[in-house]
Protein backbone atom coordinates (compact mmCIF):
# COMPACT_ATOMS: atom_id res chain seq x y z
CA UNK A 1 0.00 0.00 0.00
CA UNK A 2 1.22 3.52 -0.80
CA UNK A 3 2.54 5.41 2.23
CA UNK A 4 0.89 8.72 3.28
CA UNK A 5 4.04 10.72 2.42
CA UNK A 6 4.03 9.31 -1.10
CA UNK A 7 0.36 10.18 -1.47
CA UNK A 8 1.11 13.74 -0.39
CA UNK A 9 3.82 13.91 -3.04
CA UNK A 10 1.31 12.64 -5.57
CA UNK A 11 -1.24 15.39 -4.84
CA UNK A 12 1.53 17.95 -5.47
CA UNK A 13 3.10 16.32 -8.49
CA UNK A 14 0.03 15.22 -10.51
CA UNK A 15 -1.29 18.69 -11.24
CA UNK A 16 -3.33 17.71 -14.25
CA UNK A 17 -5.30 15.32 -12.08
CA UNK A 18 -5.54 17.24 -8.80
CA UNK A 19 -4.87 20.88 -9.61
CA UNK A 20 -2.25 23.01 -7.84
CA UNK A 21 -1.58 22.05 -4.23
CA UNK A 22 -0.10 24.58 -1.81
CA UNK A 23 -0.10 22.58 1.42
CA UNK A 24 -0.93 19.07 2.56
CA UNK A 25 -0.63 17.60 6.06
CA UNK A 26 -1.39 14.15 7.44
CA UNK A 27 -1.43 13.73 11.23
CA UNK A 28 -2.32 10.51 13.02
CA UNK A 29 -2.40 10.61 16.80
CA UNK A 30 0.69 12.47 17.92
CA UNK A 31 2.61 11.67 14.73
CA UNK A 32 2.99 13.92 11.69
CA UNK A 33 3.08 11.42 8.85
CA UNK A 34 3.55 13.96 6.07
CA UNK A 35 3.71 17.72 5.62
CA UNK A 36 4.62 19.53 2.43
CA UNK A 37 4.34 23.06 1.03
CA UNK A 38 4.99 24.30 -2.48
CA UNK A 39 4.09 26.38 -5.53
CA UNK A 40 3.09 30.02 -5.19
CA UNK A 41 -0.23 31.73 -4.52
CA UNK A 42 -1.09 34.03 -7.45
CA UNK A 43 -2.19 37.62 -6.96
CA UNK A 44 -3.59 40.39 -9.13
CA UNK A 45 -2.08 43.09 -6.90
CA UNK A 46 1.45 41.91 -6.05
CA UNK A 47 4.04 39.29 -6.90
CA UNK A 48 2.98 35.66 -6.48
CA UNK A 49 3.57 34.65 -2.86
CA UNK A 50 5.74 31.60 -2.11
CA UNK A 51 3.97 29.15 0.19
CA UNK A 52 5.48 28.46 3.62
CA UNK A 53 4.16 27.05 6.92
CA UNK A 54 3.27 30.66 7.82
CA UNK A 55 1.00 31.14 4.78
CA UNK A 56 -2.61 31.82 5.82
CA UNK A 57 -4.99 29.99 3.52
CA UNK A 58 -8.42 31.19 2.51
CA UNK A 59 -11.02 28.80 3.89
CA UNK A 60 -13.80 29.40 1.43
CA UNK A 61 -16.59 27.12 2.70
CA UNK A 62 -14.49 25.51 5.42
CA UNK A 63 -15.68 28.67 7.22
CA UNK A 64 -19.11 27.02 7.49
CA UNK A 65 -17.65 24.38 9.80
CA UNK A 66 -16.09 27.13 11.95
CA UNK A 67 -19.53 28.75 12.07
CA UNK A 68 -20.95 25.42 13.27
CA UNK A 69 -18.54 25.56 16.21
CA UNK A 70 -19.59 29.15 17.04
CA UNK A 71 -23.25 28.17 17.01
CA UNK A 72 -22.48 25.19 19.23
CA UNK A 73 -21.01 27.45 21.90
CA UNK A 74 -24.15 29.60 21.91
CA UNK A 75 -26.54 26.64 21.87
CA UNK A 76 -24.63 25.19 24.81
CA UNK A 77 -25.06 28.46 26.70
CA UNK A 78 -28.78 28.56 25.93
CA UNK A 79 -28.43 31.73 23.86
CA UNK A 80 -29.60 30.15 20.62
CA UNK A 81 -32.36 27.58 20.14
CA UNK A 82 -32.02 24.86 17.52
CA UNK A 83 -35.66 23.96 17.07
CA UNK A 84 -37.68 27.13 17.64
CA UNK A 85 -38.42 29.41 14.67
CA UNK A 86 -35.24 31.38 14.02
CA UNK A 87 -35.51 35.09 14.94
CA UNK A 88 -34.87 36.43 11.43
CA UNK A 89 -36.35 39.94 10.94
CA UNK A 90 -37.24 39.34 7.29
CA UNK A 91 -39.47 36.42 8.37
CA UNK A 92 -41.01 37.86 11.53
CA UNK A 93 -44.61 38.03 10.31
CA UNK A 94 -46.46 34.91 11.54
CA UNK A 95 -48.14 34.39 8.16
CA UNK A 96 -44.78 34.43 6.34
CA UNK A 97 -44.11 30.80 5.32
CA UNK A 98 -40.44 31.35 6.18
CA UNK A 99 -41.37 32.18 9.78
CA UNK A 100 -41.21 28.48 10.76
CA UNK A 101 -37.62 27.92 9.58
CA UNK A 102 -35.42 26.73 12.44
CA UNK A 103 -31.72 27.16 13.10
CA UNK A 104 -31.31 23.39 12.90
CA UNK A 105 -32.85 23.34 9.42
CA UNK A 106 -30.47 26.07 8.31
CA UNK A 107 -27.42 24.28 9.65
CA UNK A 108 -28.53 21.13 7.79
CA UNK A 109 -29.17 23.15 4.60
CA UNK A 110 -32.82 22.11 4.68
CA UNK A 111 -34.39 25.54 5.18
CA UNK A 112 -36.15 25.54 1.79
CA UNK A 113 -34.96 28.96 0.62
CA UNK A 114 -34.56 29.57 -3.09
CA UNK A 115 -30.79 30.07 -3.44
CA UNK A 116 -28.58 28.99 -6.34
CA UNK A 117 -25.03 28.00 -5.36
CA UNK A 118 -23.36 28.37 -8.75
CA UNK A 119 -19.68 29.33 -9.08
CA UNK A 120 -19.55 29.69 -12.86
CA UNK A 121 -22.50 31.59 -14.32
CA UNK A 122 -22.60 35.01 -12.66
CA UNK A 123 -25.84 35.85 -14.49
CA UNK A 124 -27.64 33.07 -12.58
CA UNK A 125 -25.63 32.66 -9.40
CA UNK A 126 -26.98 33.90 -6.08
CA UNK A 127 -23.71 33.19 -4.28
CA UNK A 128 -21.64 35.30 -6.70
CA UNK A 129 -24.15 38.16 -6.47
CA UNK A 130 -24.18 37.89 -2.67
CA UNK A 131 -20.40 37.87 -2.19
CA UNK A 132 -19.31 40.16 -5.02
CA UNK A 133 -22.40 41.92 -6.38
CA UNK A 134 -25.54 43.54 -5.05
CA UNK A 135 -25.52 41.63 -1.76
CA UNK A 136 -21.93 42.14 -0.67
CA UNK A 137 -22.60 44.98 1.79
CA UNK A 138 -25.17 42.95 3.76
CA UNK A 139 -24.86 39.27 2.90
CA UNK A 140 -27.37 38.06 5.50
CA UNK A 141 -30.14 40.38 4.36
CA UNK A 142 -29.53 39.41 0.75
CA UNK A 143 -29.99 35.74 1.63
CA UNK A 144 -32.85 36.17 4.09
CA UNK A 145 -34.80 38.13 1.48
CA UNK A 146 -34.97 35.05 -0.78
CA UNK A 147 -38.37 33.35 -1.13
CA UNK A 148 -39.11 29.74 -0.28
CA UNK A 149 -38.66 27.11 -2.97
CA UNK A 150 -39.55 24.14 -0.74
CA UNK A 151 -41.30 23.50 2.54
CA UNK A 152 -38.77 23.97 5.37
CA UNK A 153 -37.17 20.69 6.36
CA UNK A 154 -38.23 18.83 3.23
CA UNK A 155 -35.34 19.39 0.80
CA UNK A 156 -31.54 19.68 0.86
CA UNK A 157 -30.08 22.69 -0.94
CA UNK A 158 -26.48 23.67 -0.20
CA UNK A 159 -26.48 27.44 0.27
CA UNK A 160 -23.83 29.94 1.33
CA UNK A 161 -26.65 32.39 1.83
CA UNK A 162 -28.12 30.23 4.56
CA UNK A 163 -24.78 30.20 6.40
CA UNK A 164 -24.67 33.99 6.39
CA UNK A 165 -28.15 34.20 7.90
CA UNK A 166 -26.90 31.92 10.66
CA UNK A 167 -23.82 34.10 11.07
CA UNK A 168 -26.00 37.17 11.61
CA UNK A 169 -27.87 35.27 14.35
CA UNK A 170 -24.50 34.73 16.02
CA UNK A 171 -23.59 38.42 15.69
CA UNK A 172 -26.90 39.46 17.21
CA UNK A 173 -26.00 37.43 20.30
CA UNK A 174 -22.32 38.28 20.67
CA UNK A 175 -21.85 41.68 19.02
CA UNK A 176 -18.24 41.39 17.89
CA UNK A 177 -18.00 38.00 16.18
CA UNK A 178 -14.25 38.30 15.71
CA UNK A 179 -13.69 38.77 19.45
CA UNK A 180 -16.16 35.99 20.21
CA UNK A 181 -14.39 33.52 17.92
CA UNK A 182 -10.98 34.45 19.31
CA UNK A 183 -12.17 33.91 22.88
CA UNK A 184 -14.29 30.81 22.32
CA UNK A 185 -12.97 28.93 19.28
CA UNK A 186 -9.65 30.15 17.85
CA UNK A 187 -8.01 30.81 21.22
CA UNK A 188 -8.95 27.54 22.94
CA UNK A 189 -8.02 25.54 19.83
CA UNK A 190 -4.68 27.36 19.46
CA UNK A 191 -5.40 28.91 16.05
CA UNK A 192 -3.23 31.96 16.63
CA UNK A 193 -3.03 32.80 12.91
CA UNK A 194 -6.80 32.80 12.30
CA UNK A 195 -8.76 35.87 11.24
CA UNK A 196 -12.14 36.51 9.65
CA UNK A 197 -13.73 38.94 7.23
CA UNK A 198 -17.00 40.76 7.87
CA UNK A 199 -19.28 42.69 5.52
CA UNK A 200 -20.17 46.37 5.86
CA UNK A 201 -23.12 45.46 8.10
CA UNK A 202 -20.71 43.84 10.56
CA UNK A 203 -21.70 40.26 9.84
CA UNK A 204 -18.96 37.64 9.69
CA UNK A 205 -19.13 36.18 6.17
CA UNK A 206 -19.47 32.74 7.70
CA UNK A 207 -20.06 31.11 4.37
CA UNK A 208 -16.62 31.82 3.04
CA UNK A 209 -14.06 33.99 4.84
CA UNK A 210 -11.69 32.62 7.45
CA UNK A 211 -7.91 32.67 7.00
CA UNK A 212 -5.41 30.49 8.86
CA UNK A 213 -2.24 28.47 8.34
CA UNK A 214 -2.50 24.82 7.39
CA UNK A 215 -1.17 23.79 10.80
CA UNK A 216 -3.85 25.85 12.53
CA UNK A 217 -6.52 24.32 10.30
CA UNK A 218 -5.27 20.91 11.48
CA UNK A 219 -5.81 22.11 15.07
CA UNK A 220 -9.41 22.97 14.24
CA UNK A 221 -9.89 19.51 12.78
CA UNK A 222 -8.37 17.96 15.91
CA UNK A 223 -10.94 19.73 18.07
CA UNK A 224 -13.71 17.90 16.18
CA UNK A 225 -11.60 14.73 16.17
CA UNK A 226 -11.68 14.81 19.98
CA UNK A 227 -15.43 15.45 20.30
CA UNK A 228 -15.04 19.17 20.80
CA UNK A 229 -12.14 19.08 23.25
CA UNK A 230 -8.88 20.97 22.73
CA UNK A 231 -5.92 21.44 25.06
CA UNK A 232 -7.90 19.95 27.94
CA UNK A 233 -10.80 22.36 27.47
CA UNK A 234 -14.26 21.70 26.10
CA UNK A 235 -14.78 24.07 23.15
CA UNK A 236 -18.23 22.95 21.97
CA UNK A 237 -20.80 21.04 24.04
CA UNK A 238 -20.71 17.29 24.35
CA UNK A 239 -22.63 15.83 21.41
CA UNK A 240 -22.25 18.91 19.23
CA UNK A 241 -19.69 17.25 16.97
CA UNK A 242 -22.18 14.45 16.34
CA UNK A 243 -24.81 17.08 15.53
CA UNK A 244 -22.67 18.39 12.70
CA UNK A 245 -21.19 15.17 11.41
CA UNK A 246 -24.08 12.70 11.45
CA UNK A 247 -25.28 12.31 7.87
CA UNK A 248 -28.77 13.71 7.25
CA UNK A 249 -28.87 14.39 3.53
CA UNK A 250 -27.48 13.31 0.18
CA UNK A 251 -26.64 16.09 -2.25
CA UNK A 252 -28.74 15.28 -5.32
CA UNK A 253 -26.13 16.82 -7.61
CA UNK A 254 -23.14 14.66 -6.68
CA UNK A 255 -24.32 12.05 -4.15
CA UNK A 256 -22.16 13.38 -1.30
CA UNK A 257 -23.42 13.06 2.25
CA UNK A 258 -24.11 16.08 4.44
CA UNK A 259 -24.69 16.56 8.14
CA UNK A 260 -24.92 20.12 9.48
CA UNK A 261 -22.26 22.44 8.04
CA UNK A 262 -19.98 19.37 7.68
CA UNK A 263 -19.77 16.85 4.84
CA UNK A 264 -19.84 13.13 5.61
CA UNK A 265 -17.73 10.28 4.22
CA UNK A 266 -19.03 7.25 6.13
CA UNK A 267 -17.44 4.72 3.77
CA UNK A 268 -13.97 5.99 4.81
CA UNK A 269 -13.99 4.61 8.36
CA UNK A 270 -16.77 7.03 9.36
CA UNK A 271 -14.82 10.14 8.37
CA UNK A 272 -16.27 13.61 7.89
CA UNK A 273 -14.78 16.73 6.36
CA UNK A 274 -14.91 20.48 5.95
CA UNK A 275 -14.84 21.48 2.30
CA UNK A 276 -14.09 24.72 0.51
CA UNK A 277 -14.17 26.05 -3.05
CA UNK A 278 -11.21 25.05 -5.26
CA UNK A 279 -10.47 21.94 -3.23
CA UNK A 280 -9.79 23.11 0.32
CA UNK A 281 -10.28 20.06 2.56
CA UNK A 282 -9.95 19.12 6.23
CA UNK A 283 -10.82 15.47 6.76
CA UNK A 284 -11.41 14.13 10.27
CA UNK A 285 -11.46 10.40 11.04
CA UNK A 286 -11.96 9.67 14.76
CA UNK A 287 -11.82 5.91 14.21
CA UNK A 288 -8.22 6.22 13.01
CA UNK A 289 -7.28 9.31 15.09
CA UNK A 290 -6.49 10.97 11.76
CA UNK A 291 -6.50 14.44 10.21
CA UNK A 292 -5.84 15.10 6.52
CA UNK A 293 -5.64 18.72 5.32
CA UNK A 294 -5.12 19.96 1.77
CA UNK A 295 -5.13 23.52 0.41
CA UNK A 296 -4.76 24.53 -3.21
CA UNK A 297 -6.58 25.47 -6.40
CA UNK A 298 -8.55 22.84 -8.27
CA UNK A 299 -11.42 22.93 -10.71
CA UNK A 300 -14.73 21.21 -10.07
CA UNK A 301 -13.71 18.57 -12.61
CA UNK A 302 -10.87 17.59 -10.26
CA UNK A 303 -12.97 17.29 -7.08
CA UNK A 304 -13.71 13.58 -7.55
CA UNK A 305 -9.98 12.86 -7.88
CA UNK A 306 -9.31 14.84 -4.69
CA UNK A 307 -11.96 12.88 -2.84
CA UNK A 308 -10.43 9.64 -4.08
CA UNK A 309 -7.03 10.91 -2.90
CA UNK A 310 -8.42 11.56 0.57
CA UNK A 311 -9.92 8.08 0.69
CA UNK A 312 -6.55 6.62 -0.33
CA UNK A 313 -4.82 8.51 2.48
CA UNK A 314 -7.36 7.17 4.96
CA UNK A 315 -6.85 3.62 3.68
CA UNK A 316 -3.08 4.04 3.96
CA UNK A 317 -3.46 4.98 7.61
CA UNK A 318 -5.92 2.22 8.54
Image (cartoon, grey):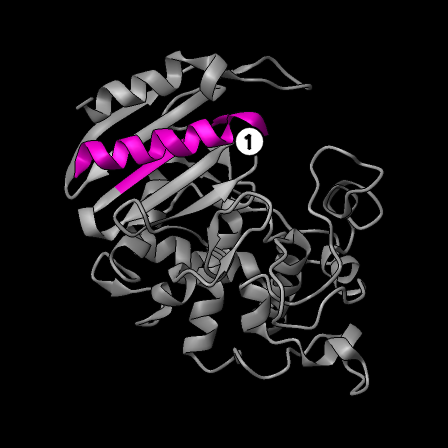
Q: Residue furthest bottom?
A: 94
Q: How many marks?
A: 1
Is 42 above or below relative to 280?
above
Q: Nearer the viewer, residue 234 or 110?
A: 110
Q: Residue at x 33, y 51 (%)?
A: 266
311 magenta-colored: yes
Q: Nearer the viewer, residue 239 or 179?
A: 239
Q: Is residue 97 left or right of residue 307?
A: right
Q: Nearer the viewer, residue 106 or 265?
A: 265
Q: Is residue 271 left or right of residue 302?
A: left
Is 2 above or below relative to 248?
above
Q: Is residue 295 visible?
A: no
Q: Main secondary structure of the magenta part?
A: helix
Residue 84 % position (x, y) = 58, 84
The answer to which image quadrant residue 237 occupies is: bottom left
Residue 183 % position (x, y) = 42, 61
- Find numbered disc 1 in the image and state the secondary structure of the residue it sits on: loop
In the picture of the structure, the residue carrying the numbered disc 1 is 278
Q: What stretch of residues is rendered in magenta?
A: 291-318
Is 109 above or below relative to 276?
below
Residue 24 % position (x, y) = 35, 27
Q: Is residue 61 visible?
A: yes
Q: Residue at x 50, y 19 (%)?
A: 19
Is 91 above or below relative to 126?
below
Amino acid sequence: MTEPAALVDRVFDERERFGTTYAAIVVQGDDSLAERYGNAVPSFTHDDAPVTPETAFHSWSIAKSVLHAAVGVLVGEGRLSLHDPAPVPEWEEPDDPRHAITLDQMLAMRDGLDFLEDYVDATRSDVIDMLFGSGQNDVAHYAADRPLAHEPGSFFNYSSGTSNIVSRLVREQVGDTDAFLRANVFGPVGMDSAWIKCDDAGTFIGSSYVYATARDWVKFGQCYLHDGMSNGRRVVPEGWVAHGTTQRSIDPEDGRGYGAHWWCLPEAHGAFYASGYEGQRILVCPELDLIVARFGRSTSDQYDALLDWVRNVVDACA
